[in-house]
Image: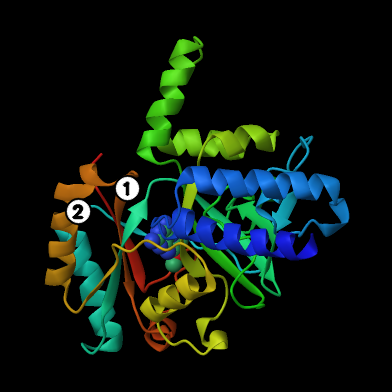
Amino acid sequence: IEQRIAELNKLLHEYGHAYYVLDQPIVADSVYDQLLHELIALEEANPSLIYPDSPTQRVGGAVVEGFKKVTHDFPMLSLSNAFNEADLREFDRKVRQAIGDHFSYVCELKIDGLAISLKYENGVFVQGATRGDGVVGEDITTNLKTIRAIPLRLKEPITIEVRGEAYMPKKSFEALNAQRADNGEELFANPRNAAAGSLRQLDPKIAASRQLSTFIYAIGGDGEVYGIDGHAEMLDYLEELGFPSNKERQRCSTIEEVLAFIDKWTENRSNLAYEIDGIVIKVDRYAQQDELGYTAKSPRWAIAYKFPA
Ligand SMILES: COc1nc2nc(N)nc(N)c2nc1C
């Protein structure tokens, strides 16, 4: 029995990662479901053999009375905004004034969801929180556990805090609103509101039914601690650990390349499976980010270009 339970945990972890994190299923849903039901049955008969990170534990949480407050170990940043080419060129001018011309940007899609922080101790997911005011957020661990793209255990037993965007894919949003229309319920205005509403549910079973996902885009604290000296490299490392990160990121050497990336996604964003509200541009290397530093509330080494509303 122990051996079969261990094998099922391993298989379901691998299949789940491929499907929910890499978006590259390796078995049919029916196979996954069949194995999951076998594990549920074995765990019911042998509760002492339930692994804490078993996929059956994702929707285990009881209904909570409310969400307790959490002070982030590392404050969650906010990005300054750019609305047009002139803003972007001004940002680029300031960067070059501070660190010269030998650097590259990393451009990423700005997912239209809500910011979350995930804490792992020795590789195990222990706490998840909303951004709140950047310093104090709300503990929504039980709801975040229901997001299959969030690994319950990392590939390495490390202690790390990561930040990302929780979001509702367009298809899930359309299905949810169709169902609400049938039930005569009020519709959600957009996927962002639907995602926020889902993660504020006191009953994790409701959050689990909303098919949310996430992309991880940063860590809390100092990347050099992990022997990594740039953001692009950090995103690759986070993927190796088992986190989902958005693959549409691109290194750009000049603001012209950044503008081209923005044009490309201004055109193509309707083809994405999720909504984006802009493009985030970051200076890649940590040493150069440190040189640029921060204003009172946001980094000088990054900017968020917002699409026209
Ligand atoms: C470094 O800080 C940040 N990085 C980000 N990256 C992406 N892709 N999207 C965001 N919304 C985002 N937000 C912040 C505060």
Marks 1 and 2, how far apart at CA: 9 Å
In the rendered view of the protein, which quadrant contains the C terminus? top left
Residue hosting label 1: 276
The answer to whether residue 241 is left or right of residue 234 is right
Q: Quadrant of residue 209?
A: top right
Q: Is mark 1 within 8 Å of ligand 1?
A: no
Residue at 21% x, 68% y is 90
The answer to whether residue 42 is left or right of residue 237 is right
The numbered mark at residue 206 is: none
Q: Percent x, y for residue 140?
A: 67, 47
Q: Is mark 2 within 8 Å of ligand 1?
A: no
Location of residue 228 with respect to 142 vertically, above or below: below
Amino acid under disc 1: Ile
Considering only order in the chain, which callout, 2 or 1, is on the residue closer to the N terminus? 2
Most foreground residue, 105 or 31: 31
Q: Quadrant of ligand 1?
A: bottom left
Residue hosting label 2: 265
Res 243 seen here: yes
The answer to whether residue 210 is left or right of residue 232 is right
Location of residue 108 with respect to 28 vertically, above or below: below
Amino acid under disc 2: Trp
Q: Quadrant of residue 152?
A: bottom right
Res 72 seen here: no
Most foreground residue, 45 or 253: 45
The answer to whether residue 257 is left or right of residue 234 is left
Most foreground residue, 150 or 164: 150
Residue at 30% x, 84% y is 98
Residue at 16% x, 61% y is 86
Q: Percent x, y for residue 238?
A: 49, 72
